[in-house]
DNA sequence: AGCACGCCGACT
DNA sequence: GTCGGCGTGCTC
């Protein structure tokens, strides 16, 4: 027999995104059988170097693809899923994100998976299912209201229900365990049922005013098509009702809805609002979940069992087979941008996801970001305005208090104190804001001017009096005992300068000795449950003074508050960052929205040393939209984002000269590209130059041509990482929130 | 990012 | 003598 040319045995390979801080995917070989079964989007266990990791198949290489002999190919350890658990569209979204944010694909892919699946746990976990054993147990639960409720619900499900469903129905696990102890029910592990329950809309009259109706109809025009909408609605104008009615229609078509809210926005109130309207499976994805709860919620979304997915930032990467609508509420909120590691912006990712998925995306806010207004301006987003407040509610009035000329007591204008007294006399509540935690921001020596500074940072220590006297650095967390004399001149008269919430609390107690001051900040609300207590007090019609930081500004309703005081808005107005006024205006409007939601008219007092500030006056005399319009013009003139695109490079090491020299060297390389319209700021030392003993410098790149900017930065950034000394930490921030 | 190997200080 | 400090090099 003549020799036949022997074709080499095919080598079956997959390209895997491995969870390491490296920019490439890695190829692994597998058997013909495994190759046939393997799907893009399934997990594989692989050995990587000396470690064992769980990666995701990004690509099946054709068997005849050329073999790269520069590395030795390893076999996968195991194929973990027999199907794709991340669908093609989400994989596409992840690939795009890794490119856009210049972050390693393996780590980006991890953000789409719940912890247990990242750890390689099997997909089909058994779910805890509760079954009723005794259906004549009424007498045994008579003494506990919670147990009665749980018993009633268990009775409705003769074959048993999963713990998730019971929890969603308001039955907590502890109650079930109590019933189990009494022998009323039992817990068994059963394979989960991922079939979606039928979607039912609660029977309630749908009320929408003409504006709301128009908004709903506009969005519903886009069924299987991408369109971005900005729902620009005043506080109290019924944005949520618009969301709910659009959702109702989309759910009726058998599609899933993804709803993203800010980190602190996922309150029990928000959840119950959705639950009472839609009787379907709602998957909740937020940071407070334990690993198995999170897995279950994720699986409900991924299998299509859940019709609604309600989550925070990272939920934007949840696979959903029938996604038909994305809603992102409070779209201006900072928490949508991840501020470390993989620095993505969920709002921008949401827009791209809508585009991939061919479904509408609704961004809503009472104070939309300037970025979103710019998208409206250039036709990439359609604006839907809601201007009517429901019922007789009036918009609160803003007042500027000039601190330069005002008579003051303890740094609070006398006029404001009088107004506060009037409200308290009328048994109304007051909200006082100060965006500074602690007792006072400075401890100074009366004799020589020495100031207490953190030994690790270029920052003053903040004086705290609670829970005991101490100095605390808010930048690195260092805690120091309170000195009893000046370390520089031994003088014993040390005094505090400026006000934190702690000091203001003291002063308010002094000014209004007959009224309770309720302080809400990280120092006073850290204990679990204390927020609930505060919340209960707020809901009662009793005169009270609420004192807090930004924590108070968001989401919560304070029906009895008729006066809001912001003691110091200047730190926001005078900040060097170009977005500072935007943030301050949003804060003012959001805070104002807390006041006078009922028929009582609210007033908002702003204390400032800059009463003539142009943008502040536009906000006070006109409204947020006028402010936004003016800001857009200013940004355009100054050629700032969103009219140019920014990329920020941070460089951190123990040697500041090394940082600046390194950045300078690479800035010069980038400047060589003549066809890139580029402006480079810096490198300059970071505003907090020394932080926890390390120095930071940064540099900002600005260009009007986003595509070209990203194109050049891609190669340049890789070269920079290659060239960096190992002791140096470099981070890239695409579309940074702050430029300084 | 891990996790190795690799070469210099204070310890049972 | 070692135990271990963290400097740098690699991972399909």
Image: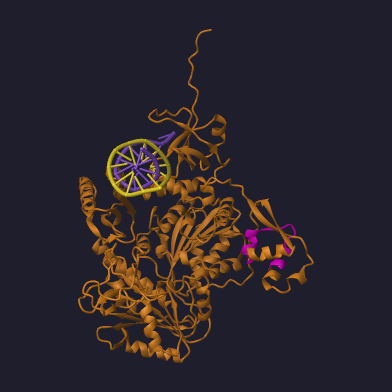
Chain colours: A orange, B yellow, C purple
Task: Say above or below: A14 vs A503.
Answer: above
Identity of the residue furthest to the top in this view? A1
Q: Position of residue A630 (x, y in %)?
A: 30, 70
Q: Position of residue A109 (x, y in %)?
A: 46, 47
User: Which residue corresponds to the image point at 24% horizontal and 72% vertical from the top-left?
Assistant: A487
- Say whether residue A83 is left or right of residue A231: right
Res. A419 image quadrant = bottom left
Q: Position of residue A31 (x, y in %)?
A: 54, 30
Q: Position of residue A531 (x, y in %)?
A: 50, 73
Task: Say above or below: A133 vs A445.
Answer: above
- Residue A522 visible at all: yes
Q: Is residue A154 magenta?
A: yes
Q: Nearer the viewer, residue A632 or A65?
A: A65
Q: Nearer the viewer, residue A265 or A532?
A: A532
Res. A608 image quadrant = bottom left
User: Which residue corresponds to the image point at 61% horizontal and 54% vertical from the top-left?
Assistant: A305
User: Which residue corresponds to the image point at 31% horizontal and 61% vertical from the top-left?
Assistant: A738
Bounds of the magenta segment? A150-172
């Amino acid at each position: 027999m003549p020799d036949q040319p022997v074709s080499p045995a095919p080598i079956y390979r997959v390209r895997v995104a491995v969870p390491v801080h490296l920019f490439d995917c890695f190829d692994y070989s597998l058997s013909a059988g495994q190759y046939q079964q393997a799907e893009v989007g399934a997990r594989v266990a692989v050995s990587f170097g000396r470690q064992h990791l769980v990666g995701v198949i990004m690509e099946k290489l054709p068997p005849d693809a050329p073999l790269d002999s520069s590395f030795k190919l390893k076999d996968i350890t195991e194929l973990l899923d027999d199907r794709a658990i991340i669908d093609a569209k989400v994989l596409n979204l992840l690939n795009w994100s890794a490119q856009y944010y210049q972050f390693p694909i393996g780590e980006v892919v991890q953000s789409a998976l719940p912890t247990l699946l990242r750890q390689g746990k099997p997909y089909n976990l058994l779910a805890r299912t509760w079954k009723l054993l005794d259906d004549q147990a009424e007498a045994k639960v008579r003494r506990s209201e919670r147990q009665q409720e749980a018993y009633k619900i268990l009775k409705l499900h003769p074959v048993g229900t999963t713990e998730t469903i019971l929890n969603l129905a308001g039955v907590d696990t502890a109650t079930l365990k109590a019933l189990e102890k009494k022998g009323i029910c039992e817990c068994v592990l059963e394979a989960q049922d991922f079939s979606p329950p039928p979607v039912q809309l609660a029977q309630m009259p749908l009320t929408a005013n003409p504006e709301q109706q128009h908004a709903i109809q506009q969005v519903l025009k886009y069924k299987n098509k991408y369109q971005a909408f900005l729902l620009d609605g005043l506080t109290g104008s019924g944005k949520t009702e618009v969301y709910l009615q659009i959702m109702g229609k989309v759910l009726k078509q058998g599609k899933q809805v993804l709803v993203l809210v800010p980190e602190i926005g996922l309150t029990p109130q928000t959840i119950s609002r959705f639950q009472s309207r839609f009787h379907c499976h709602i998957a909740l994805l937020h940071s407070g979940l334990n690993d198995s709860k999170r897995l279950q919620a994720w699986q409900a979304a991924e299998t299509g069992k859940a019709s609604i997915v309600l989550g925070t930032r990272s939920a934007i990467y949840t696979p959903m087979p029938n996604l038909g609508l994305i809603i992102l509420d409070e779209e201006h909120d900072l928490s949508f941008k991840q501020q470390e590691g993989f620095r993505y912006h969920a709002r921008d990712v949401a827009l791209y996801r809508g585009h991939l998925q061919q479904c509408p995306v609704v961004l809503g806010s009472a104070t939309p970001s300037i970025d979103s207004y710019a998208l409206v301006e250039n036709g990439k987003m359609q604006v839907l305005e809601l201007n009517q407040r429901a019922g007789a509610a009036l918009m609160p009035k803003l007042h500027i208090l000039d601190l330069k000329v005002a008579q003051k007591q303890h740094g609070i204008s006398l006029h404001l104190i009088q107004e506060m007294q009037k409200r308290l006399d009328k048994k109304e509540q007051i909200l006082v804001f100060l965006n500074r935690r602690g007792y006072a921001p400075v401890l100074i020596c009366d004799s020589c001017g020495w100031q207490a500074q953190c030994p690790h940072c270029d920052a003053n220590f903040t004086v705290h009096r609670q829970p005991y006297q101490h100095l605390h650095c808010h930048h690195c967390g260092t805690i120091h005992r309170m000195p009893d004399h000046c370390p520089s001149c031994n003088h014993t008269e040390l005094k505090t300068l400026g006000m934190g919430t702690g000091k203001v609390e003291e002063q308010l107690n002094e000014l209004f000795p007959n009224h309770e001051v309720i302080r809400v900040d990280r120092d006073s609300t850290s204990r679990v449950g204390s927020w609930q207590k505060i919340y209960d007090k707020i809901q009662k019609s009793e005169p009270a003074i609420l004192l807090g930081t930004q924590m108070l500004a968001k989401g919560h309703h304070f029906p009895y508050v008729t006066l809001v005081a912001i003691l110091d808005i200047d730190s926001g107005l005078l900040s060097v960052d170009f977005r500072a006024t935007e943030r301050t205006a949003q804060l003012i409007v959001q805070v104002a929205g807390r006041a006078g939601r009922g028929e009582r008219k609210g007033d908002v007092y702003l204390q400032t040393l800059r009463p003539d500030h142009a943008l502040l006056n536009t906000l006070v005399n006109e409204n947020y939209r006028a402010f936004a319009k003016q800001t857009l013009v200013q940004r355009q003139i100054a050629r700032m984002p969103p009219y140019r695109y920014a990329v920020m490079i941070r460089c951190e090491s123990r040697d500041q000269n090394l940082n600046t020299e390194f950045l300078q060297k690479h800035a010069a390389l980038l400047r060589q590209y003549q066809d890139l319209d580029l402006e480079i700021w810096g490198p300059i030392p970071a505003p907090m130059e020394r932080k926890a003993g390390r120095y930071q410098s940064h540099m900002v790149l600005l260009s009007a041509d986003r595509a070209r900017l990203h194109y050049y930065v891609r190669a340049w950034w890789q070269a920079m990482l290659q060239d960096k000394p190992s002791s140096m930490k470099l981070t890239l921030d695409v579309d940074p929130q702050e430029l300084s």
